[in-house]
Every structure is written in C-alpha cells, then in structure tokens.
Amino acid sequence: MRRLLAISAVAALPLTSGIVPAHAEDPGDRQQAFAAAAQEFEVPESVLLGVSYLESRWEAHAGQPSNDAGFGPMHLTDAAAYAASNHHSDGEEDARGDESRPLPAPEPQQSSVAIPASLRTMEKAAQLTGETHERLRTDDTANIRGGAALLADYQKSLGAPLSDNPGEWYGAVAKYSGAQEDGAAKFFADEVFATIKDGAARTTDDGQRVTLPAVPNVDKIEKWLEKLGLRPTRKDGVECPASVSCEWIPSAYQELPPPKDYGHYDLANRPFSQKIEYIIIHDMEGYFAPSIRMNQDPTYGASWQYSVRSSDGHIAQHIKGKDVAWQAGNWYVNAKSIGIEHEGFLAEGSTWYTEAMYRSSARLVRYLAFRYGIPLDRAHILGHDNVPGTLPTTVKQMHEDPGPFWDWAHYFQLMGAPLHRFGGPDSGSIMIKPDFATNKPYFYGCDRKNPQNACPPLPASTVWLRTEPRADAPLVKDIGKHPTGESLYSVYDHSARATTGQRFAVADRQGDWTAIWYLGQKAWFFNPASAPTAVPSAGLVVTPKPGKATVPVYGRAYPEQEAYPADIPYQAVTPLQYTFSAGEKYTLAGTAPAEYYRAVTFTMDQDHKVVRGKTKYLQIQFGHRVMFVKADDVRVTFSG
C-alpha cells in the first residue's frame, strides 16, 4: 500500500476482538425487516432481497461505508462520505519497476468531481421515509426501509405498476444500480434476477440469518430498462466476457518532452512474445472517475489494463492485453501480467467491496485466465501486496493493496475455482483459509484522522503470525519491510500476515497452533480444530539441496549475463535480503522462465526484444509475497 503508519506494534493483543457491532435488531430480525419494508412500500420481497444481496450480501458492515460511500444492507449512498479525491500515487513505489529506467515520482493529482446522483441516494431515501441520515446509516431496519422506498419511487417514475410480479420491476432494479451506461444497468439487473431465480441463504457477519427462496419462473420485462434513457456502452473491441458490462476507455500513449520520453505503458505482442503468467488485483485507493482520468494522462507514471466500478461492477478497459502496463512495481511481473484496479480503499474511509464488483471482476479474471492459460490459484492470481520487490532497496516501498478486507475465498468461489482442501489432517503443507465472516483480527490505522485508533471489528482474510504458539507472543519480523524494527498491527502492514489461498509448508504443530515456514523463520498462527483457519493442502515443496546451508531468494527471474546480446545492457541478478536455511521448506508454485523484456522506445521496433536465459527458476510462497529461487539451489519433494 501507499502509506505505512509508523506506530509501535501493540503487544499481547487478542486473536480476534470479540466485539460485535450494535444494531437495532436482534439476530434474526433482518429477515423480518425485509418483509415489513416490502409490504409497506409494495415491493416484492424477492426483489428487495435480491437487490440487497447484489449490493451487500445482506451485511450491515458495522455501519462502515462501502468503497463508494454506500451504507447498510441496501447500500444507501451518502455524499457526505464521498471524497472526490484519489491518492493512488501516494508512496515511493515505481509502478514500472525497472531500475534501469526509473520513473520520476508522480505529481500530486488534483481532482474536482461533481458528485453524481448515484452517490446521493440516502438524501432521497430520507425524503421518502422521514428517517434521519444517521438512522439510515446505522439502523438496519431504517436502511432497508430506505431501499424499499427508493425502489418504489423508481418504479413509479418509470410509469411501471407496483406489481406483485418481480419481472415488472426490472427497470427499477436497473436504476437502483446508479449506472449511466445501459450495459452496466443491465448487468446489475440481470445479476439480481439470477439471484432471485436461484435463491440464496446465508448468515451474515453479525449473526443474521437471511433467506431468499428461489423464484424459478420469473420473466424479466426488459422494456422498462429502455425507458431509463441510458447511454450505450462503448464496446470498441474490448477484451471482456460477454456477460459483464465493459467499455473501452483507452489509456494515453504518446511521446513526451524531455526529461520524460513517453507514457505510460509499453507496446508488446503478448502472448506470442511472452506468456502472460499472472493477474494482479489492485484497489485504486480512490474513486472510479478520478482513477480513469489518471490512466488518460500520459505524464502519470502508472497504468493498468482494467478498472472496475464498485456500485455496479462496470468495467473499463484501458490497455490491450498484448501490451505491458506499468502497474505492479516489478518489471518482470509487469511484463508477464495483467493489472485490474478496483474502486475503493484498503481501509481508509471505507471497508468493504460490493457483491456486484466481486461478481463482475471474478468473471473478468476467469475469462482472462482461460484466454491466456493462467492457473486459477493464489500463486498466479496475486494481490498487489503479493508482488515481490525487485531489489533489497525496493522491498520496503512495495504496495499493500487490496489489503486484509478483500474476500479471496468468495472471489474464487465466484470464479468457479473454490479453494478446496487437499490431503489429510497431518499434511505437510496447508492453505490459509479462515472463515471470512467470523475472522475479525485486530487492526489499527483505518481512521486517517486518528490512525492510532483500533479499526472496527471487520471480517478479514488474514491471520497474524507470531514467534511462539501463544496469543501474546510478538509478531514475526520482516527484515525487508522493517530492517531495524518490529512488524506492526497496522492495516497497512502485511509483514506478519498470511492470507486466504496462500499455501505454506508446515514447520510444527502444538495444540491449537500451527507453525509455517515464513521469511526464513517459524511463524505460528492460531488454528484450532473446532474453528480452523487453515486446511490441508498437500503438494510440492522446495528445500535447500544437501550441502547448502542457506539459499538466496530473488524478486525477479532474470536471465544470466551470457544470454544478453551486445545491444541490450545486462540486468543484474541480485538476491533480496532474505535467505532460507537447511531444513526449511516452501511451497512450489511452478517454474518461472528466465526472461527480460527490453522495451525502451515509443514505437514497436528492434528495441523491443525478449531476452531468454537458460537459468531455471522456481516460484515459491516465501512470505506474504511470492519470490523466486534458482532450481540448482533447491531440492523438490512432495509434501503429503
């Protein structure tokens, strides 16, 4: 992430806070609130439940706003919580990640954005219901009433009947998305009606059991969508699945006056020139519209292939998959990856991502994975926070998004690639997989004005890693992030955290605690059999070859010097500051080709070349980030 809050680590903290957010209803009453609001405003209960599911999965999120200032189960948006700013460029990371041609620090971005009506629905809900903004934000019953009132108002504005037939509400549902593009509104409405057709049931993170019975025979009356008068979605050859709303908003690419040369991506011919190995998941640390404008500014030192909007899952593609975006802070990874930015913040100002965004993004990732042959696992679908630094000097400045509140298990479920266990209870390797809804570890740093304050107890995908098997033991250290200090409980510091889907070799077990090998040390996490935070995940692991006391690790798999032609400068193969020792094991993700993409000119010419070496590298899960080792340094075995 962009900022690391320099606050001392908190000692002896509980594994989870145990605090349950207060609500006006007792567990179980949310279902009744939906039924009562549906009856009061003459909205089919299935429609009200379906819209809420696509917005929030019926969660209240402890009264915290979403990534586009939406509150409560109905995602009522409040302009007072919307800051039309973007701090995507905060921090020291060079997005291109090629120290042979470093980028200057990005200039501060100023943005004044007119707040759209889609971000002011709470005002309208207050007018329609007489509820205060405070109650609409914090009281679930009031919030659900507000959402029902909006749907009824939208229905009337279209001239549609307040019918018991859910299909008659297709236009009102589409309008609820807030989309200005017909494709985005249609995607949202179609997903709501797919949920109504299939039904859903779940227990929310605050213990509310909510059920939407399946309504299998609903005929959507799409004529009401036409009456919204939305603008057509600009396709222009987008590389997206047909089932999502996706438009082409091209990134700027042009020559620049000295000292800059051109901006702000590189032409290539992937996958023919190089295989695309990774998809990188980012959050924007800002809002959709300002981030789009950054990608259209050739002087801005970062770019990415896709942006995803929070409110409705709408996707904008900026750069073709064949070309290389400057997005992950590591040139080796950039040259072999596609970057997807998601509207929102790791923690600051908001804490959750909408179901509409998860669904749209998951379909895009699945489409890209099949198109380019990318494995659907956490070794290839990486967060920006999983990308390694290139050199010892760049490790500390690498970004940390999308952060602990991204629901990786749900994301992979939506991709059709759920994170399954593999192996028996004594398997030599495990996959981190806490229950997202109930896993609420302590963090501080969510409140920018008071960064020392504890964050609200929120669902998270991560577990804390400690030096000993006890809750008051210190966190393990990360000598790259904190060369002389301790790891932090900050929401912006992943030094001592393991995340859902990541696989690690087991180092030890003791009672309710499991130790993994992590950054060259034993790292303990709470993993009771009654509520496990990891599952067996047998597979291949690496360990130093006999006779080797330690093995270096690398942040990129660059070729050996002999592979470079005379006209391309050698890129040094420099180990990071980490090593691991004989007896330690790390899970193997696969081979990593020794490649360097030389692209330093505006036009696609003879200066664009891929250098390929003979050195064989292996990708491992070494800490929170993936890293690389030379195959000649390690032995590969199966850990069953």
Image (tube, helix red, strand yellow):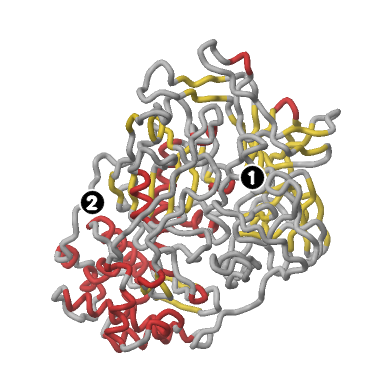
The residue where tag 1 is placed is 396
Q: 617 left or right of 633? A: left
- Give the x, y percent position of residue 222: 19, 64
User: Can residue 189 be spotted in the picture?
Assistant: no
The residue pinned by badge 2 equals 233
What amino acid is found at the position of numbered circle 2 in the picture? Thr
Residue 405 in sight:
yes
Which image quarter: residue 533? Answer: bottom right
Name the element at disc 2: loop
Q: What is the three-letter code of the residue carrying label 1?
A: Lys
* Quarter of the figure with the C terminus: top right
Residue 102 drawn above or below residue 76: above
Q: Would you place residue 500 above or below residue 370 in this image?
A: below
> Splitting the image into 4 quarters, where does residue 393 fall?
top right
Q: Position of residue 369 (x, y in %)?
A: 45, 41
Is 529 in front, or is 356? 356
Number of the front mark, 1 or 2: 1
Few, some or many residues within 10 Å of mark 2 (<14, 14–19, 20+): some
- Residue drawn at x 50%, y 73% is 61
493 w.r.t. 320: above or below: below
